[in-house]
Image (tube, rainbow, N blue to C red):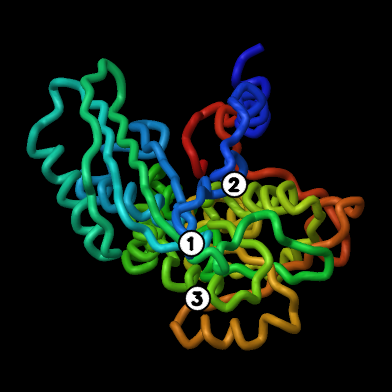
């Protein structure tokens, strides 16, 4: 049996069974955006890592080392944002072919340093190694969260509403433009800049994540890294519930709609499966959400109700033209033949 036959989720399940029993200080192990362990009386520590690999996660033909450094920091901070936490310290591991230009590494670190400083996070060490193959940039991030603010994937209950920030599928559309020169020629410059920036320079919703968690109104949260269909499935799995997503409510930008039209894909499919938007998806009862939604809007971030949590036996479905269709997972590592996220 090969890894590609079972996919990422099944592989994680198999690995988890091999690990030693968790210590008493572990609050959450495998299965959420971050691992959570006891820190002190008031705080939990949050631990996360994210690896970026050349030709899997980035292509040096269209991302500069400076942009790559910023992006690697942003996607890690997004996982801390999804738990309502505060990012604190980074470790950076690089595996580099020996012919890599020193200037290239310096530009990568300029991006890492600038983005980390933006969120008041230190870079305190790491590891360097040579490699014969593609470049590997692996970041580990330590954060913390007030114990009463911690928001996991596992608290969603039937009857709760599902919300997302921002618009979905823009990063996927940006990647399509970068990969397809013919498509790129058909999109006006300003629209192209908007979509490409969404892919190359994602903004983690750190302040909004903290606001949602501190409100204590939400029951579950995740950041949208792999696509809404995959990520909402993770909330369902961890909360042991089902979901109905109303397709016509999914927030989609005019710029993304145009790309979807030009490549002959339904825009909502790109929004569900595209991934890498790094928006937040959270679950909250409708009665409790009113005040919270106002506070998010006051920060200038749009938030949209896109569905409802239902009992597990009703499954995970999309509601389209009053018909229910099964919600398929979006991106899943190893099962995608091209190995290129977002395609
Ligand atoms: Mg995540």
Q: Above or below — where is 297 with respect to 342?
A: below
Q: The N terminus is located in which quarter?
A: top right
Q: Secondary structure at mark 3?
A: helix
Q: Which residue is mark 1?
A: 41
Q: Which residue is mark 2?
A: 28
State the residue at coordinates (74%, 53%): 239
Q: Earlier in the sequence, mark 1 or mark 2?
A: 2
Residue 325 in the image, given as x and y percentages of width and height: 83, 52
Q: Residues within 10 Å of mark 1 (few under 14, many from 20)?
A: few
Frontmost residue, 294 versus 218: 218
Judged left or right of residue 78, residue 129 is left
Q: Quadrant of residue 6?
A: top right
Q: Secondary structure at mark 1?
A: loop
Residue 326 in the image, given as x and y percentages of width and height: 81, 49
Q: Which residue is mark 3?
A: 211
Q: Are marks 1 and 3 in contact (CB under 8 Å)?
A: no
- Alpha carbon of mark 3 to alpha carbon of mark 2: how far? 22 Å
Q: Above or below — where is 337 with respect to 142?
A: above
Q: Nearer the viewer, mark 3 or mark 2?
A: 2
Residue 188 in the image, given as x and y percentages of width and height: 36, 65
Judged left or right of residue 245, residue 294 is left
Q: Nearer the viewer, mark 1 or mark 2?
A: 1
Q: Residue furthest top?
A: 1
State the residue at coordinates (56%, 44%): 26
Q: Earlier in the sequence, mark 3 or mark 2?
A: 2
- Alpha carbon of mark 1 to alpha carbon of mark 2: how far? 17 Å
Judged left or right of residue 332, residue 41 is left
Q: Secondary structure at mark 2?
A: strand
Residue 209 in the image, given as x and y percentages of width and height: 50, 68
Frontmost residue, 157 versus 336: 157
Q: Earlier in the sequence, mark 1 or mark 3?
A: 1
């Amino acid at each position: 049996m090969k890894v590609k036959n079972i996919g990422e989720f099944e592989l994680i399940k198999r690995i988890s069974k091999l690990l030693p029993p968790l210590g008493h200080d572990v609050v959450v192990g495998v299965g959420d955006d971050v691992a959570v362990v006891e820190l002190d009386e008031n705080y939990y520590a949050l631990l996360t890592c994210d690896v970026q690999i050349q030709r899997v996660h980035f292509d040096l033909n269209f991302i500069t080392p400076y942009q790559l450094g910023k992006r690697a920091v942003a996607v890690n901070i997004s996982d801390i944002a999804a738990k309502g936490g505060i990012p604190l310290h980074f470790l950076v591991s690089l595996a580099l072919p020996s012919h890599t230009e020193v200037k290239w590494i310096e530009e990568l670190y300029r991006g890492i340093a600038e983005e980390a400083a933006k969120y008041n996070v230190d870079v305190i060490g790491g590891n360097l190694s040579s490699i014969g193959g593609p470049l590997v940039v692996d970041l580990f991030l330590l954060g913390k969260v007030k114990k009463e603010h911690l928001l996991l994937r596992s608290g969603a209950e039937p009857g709760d509403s599902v919300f997302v920030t921002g618009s979905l599928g823009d990063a996927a559309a940006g990647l399509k433009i970068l990969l397809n020169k013919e498509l790129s020629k058909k999109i006006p410059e300003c629209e192209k800049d908007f979509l490409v920036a969404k892919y190359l320079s994602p903004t983690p919703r750190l302040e909004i994540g903290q606001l949602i968690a501190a409100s204590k109104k939400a029951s579950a949260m995740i950041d949208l890294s792999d696509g809404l269909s995959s990520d909402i499935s993770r909330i369902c799995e961890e909360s042991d519930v089902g979901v109905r997503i109303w397709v016509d409510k999914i927030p989609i930008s005019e710029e993304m709609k145009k790309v979807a039209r030009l490549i002959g894909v339904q825009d909502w499919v790109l929004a569900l499966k595209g991934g890498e938007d790094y928006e937040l998806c959270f679950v909250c009862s409708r009665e409790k959400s009113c005040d919270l939604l106002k506070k998010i809007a006051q920060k200038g971030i749009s938030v949209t109700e896109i569905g409802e949590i239902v009992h597990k036996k009703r499954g995970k479905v999309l509601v389209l033209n009053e018909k229910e269709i099964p919600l398929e997972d979006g991106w899943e590592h190893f099962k995608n033949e091209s190995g290129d996220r977002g395609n």
